[in-house]
Amino acid sequence: ANNTYIRVSLPAVCFVWQIAMVILFGVFIRYDEESDEKGWHEFKRSHNITSNIENDFYFRYPSFQDVHVMIFVGFGFLMTFLKRYSFGGVGFNFLIAAFGLQWALLMQGWFHSLDPVTGKITIGIESLINADFCCAGSLIAYGALLGKVSPVQLMIVTLFGVTLFAVEEYIILDLLHCRDAGGSMVIHTFGGYYGLAISWVLYRPNLNLSKRLNGSVYHSDLFAMIGALFLWMFWPSFNSAITNHGAGQHRTVINTYLSLAACVLTTFAISSMGQKKGKLDMVHIQNASLAAGVAMGTSAEFMITPYGSIIVGFCCGIISTFGYLYVTPFLEKRLKLQDTCGIHNLHAVPGMLGGFVGAIVAAAATEEVYGKEGLVETFGLSGKFENRSMSTQGAYQAAGTCVAIAFGLVGGVCVGFILRFPLWGDPADDFCFDDEAYWELPEDEETIPPVLEYNNHMINKHQDT
């Protein structure tokens, strides 16, 4: 049987990694001109700014806060649905996001903001948003592995996940010059297929030994629903957090908001239709209701129109709920792919669809709808890209989606093989989905018969008086 003893490996990984961060941050990371004391005064002088309110912080911080809540509360609580794995769901989510965001600041910094003269990376509020986005890819992957891996394995998933993310993001956003503000391609498609590929390599033929714990109880599903609602409410912020100031950000919020609303209705409809007695399934309501946020990640920034957004949401609720009803069981049986949270239906497929919807909407963009400056601004068609036609842009958007899938699948298979080495303290097949493996658990309250508890309570009350 596997040994879940991590007293040496987990502290070693955490300490070594955090000390490495101190050194790397010391060598590379500095404040940018809007967060540096001296730099900000020079910036104000050179840009004829008199007011501190012009600092990008005040523009981006509300979005950052919402994204941050999504990463730690939204994703964390969405994963608390298992009856005996809520500590692992929210706790390990917390660990790997805090670990990943530091590495992300470095990786994304080396690719996007390394000053060739000084050799330094400068960071500001937008860097923090992007680092959170970068972590999201690994947190999505965790959804496929939930309950079956050790925290040390999750650190490895995140170390490679953030690294792969930074590379594919650089290829898609910089080299191919795709637009993907909400990350349908770079975050959800990559993270989804990355997690699925790892899970496929780590297939457990005897996972049914733990199947009594692979389910929810009444209160665990309620906790997961809290996570889902935080994600649902803040998804407009997620998609718009790094879009263009002005109309771009405004439009992204409207499009995402409408799409999500439509998605909820079709999710409820298909969930009810899928059961003989028409009863709703909490799994669908927690997950498929969010698929529109994923699918709008690319196109919400474009002029997709309000009704276009609603159509995307309408279709996503149907596709995602069908995925939970039929595709996930099929993948497990036929492809030997065990996906605990069903990330295939919430991230991989809606992300891929979002990438292709974005490609179509980009290819159809015209100067009469956007205006000349509008096209240049929305699609970044300046500098060496100023002569790119919209049909070419659409083709590149589609290619970007394929790059994300390829990075996810190939990267995930490679990382999966690393995780198969028998030294990471992962649980045995009959010890999955159980917090007992890695957490000190409180004694179960259920062992005290409720009647006695009530009587004691009453007795104590009388003693007080």
Image (spheres, rainbow, N blue to C red):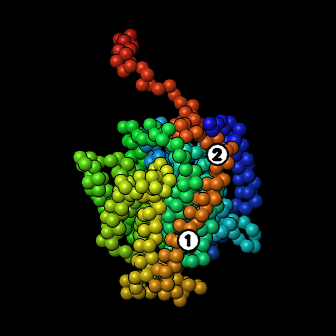
Residue 407 falls in image quadrant: bottom right
From the viewer's perspective, is residue 171 above or below residue 263? below
Q: Earlier in the sequence, mark 2 or mark 1?
A: 2
Name which residue lies at 60% across and 64% down. 410
Residue type marked 2: Val
| Residue shown at the point (58%, 45%) measured from the top left | 149
The location of residue 157, given as percent across then percent down, is 61, 53
**Percent position (x, y) of residue 188?**
49, 62
Q: Amino acid at mark 1?
A: Val
Horizontal and vertical percent for residue 302?
42, 75
- In the rendered image, the residue lying farthest to the top is 463
In this rendering, is residue 456 above or below 374?
A: above
Is residue 162 visible from the viewing direction of this image? Answer: no
Residue closer to the observer: 110 or 170: 170
Instruction: Name the residue carrying label 1.
Output: 403
Q: Residue at x 26, y 54 (%)?
A: 273
Residue occupied by mark 2: 152
> Alpha carbon of mark 2 to alpha carbon of mark 1: how far?
28 Å
The reply to whether residue 209 is in sight is yes
Q: Indicate the position of residue 291 as horizontal and vertical percent values.
A: 40, 60
Label 2 secondary element:
helix
Residue 316, image quadrant: bottom left
